[in-house]
Amino acid sequence: MQYDEYPVSEPLSRYVQTIWAMQSENDEDIYPRSLIMPDGIVEIIFHYETPFYTWQRNTSFSQPENFAVSMMRQYIEIGSSGKAGFISVRFFPWGAYHFFNVPVQTFLDQTIDAQELWGNCSGKIITELKSLTTINDRFKAVEWFLLEKLDLYQKSETQTDHAIKRIRETKGVLSMEEIYADTGFSKKQLERKFLATVGVTPKVFSRITRFLNICRNLKAQKNKTLTQLTYECGFYDQAHFIKEFKAFSGFTPTAFFEKERIYFSEI
């Protein structure tokens, strides 16, 4: 598989982490079935070759050619079903809702066909990507598409973005009281804004943020004991640490890192 990234420039870089592409180098180059862990982001996929399959909760389905997938609270599996070729836009947690008007909680833990976000525009961008012959031209087409959507849907209220950034910066250990005080929103106000922006409440978003921090600590510091990692990741005991990890990943920490082809995004 050939992997490419496109440099994200202003104003997209305020909202978009990465624009990247994956494509088969020949007809037999298949992407293997892989585990994708819960994350705190929305990602939008533009397939210009055969769409992937997704396995989730004992069901499988072919992905739409153009779709968004929201924050997940449990793992899924993906794999190619033929020659692969797609561009993916990975947003910062506060980024995606500036590009459409559909509340993110309406497609939490699932995909949504981009037609529901942008109507016929989603079909037009896929047709354009299929007609182009170089990855750089395809990247530019997606970039222009995003700039058009940002111009249409960019939100002016920034306090929710700020709250999400604070949780991210503190790796999910900031208390809810500190977040409410920091933004000036009440609990109900901030929950309503988080559901529209990232799809879950501030508390759940903090838990997922902390889970991803656990993953980074476990992977980078395998020589440390679970007790050491428990306290470094902000948990008060090992049992709570293991329970939280298993709730999001479906595995104990030990079993998780014995598996192959596991991927998770940094939020």
Image (cartoon, rainbow, N blue to C red):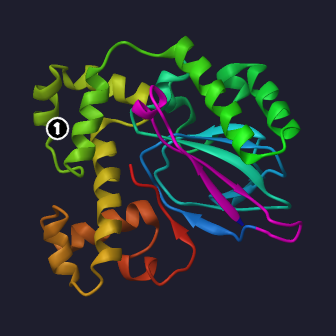
User: Is residue 22 among the parts visible in the rendering?
Assistant: yes
Compared to residue 218, the image places residue 7 above or below, namely above
Residue tagged 1: 176
**Residue at the image position 53 percent from the left and 60 percent from the top:** 75
Q: Using residue 242 as the reference point, say whether residue 155 is left or right of it.
A: right
| Quarter of the figure with the N terminus | bottom right
Residue that lies at the very extreme toward the bottom in this rendered image: 223
Helix, strand or loop under label 1: helix
Residue drawn at x 52%, y 80% is: 259
Residue under the point 73% across and 47% down:
135
Check the image and report above or below for 27 versus 131.
below
Residue 19: in magenta span: yes
Q: Vertically, is 148 above or below 35?
A: above
Left of 238 or right of it: where is 132? right
- In percent of width and height, residue 49 lies at 83, 49
Q: Which residues are magenta?
A: 2-30
Q: Give percent across and percent down for residue 237.
A: 15, 70
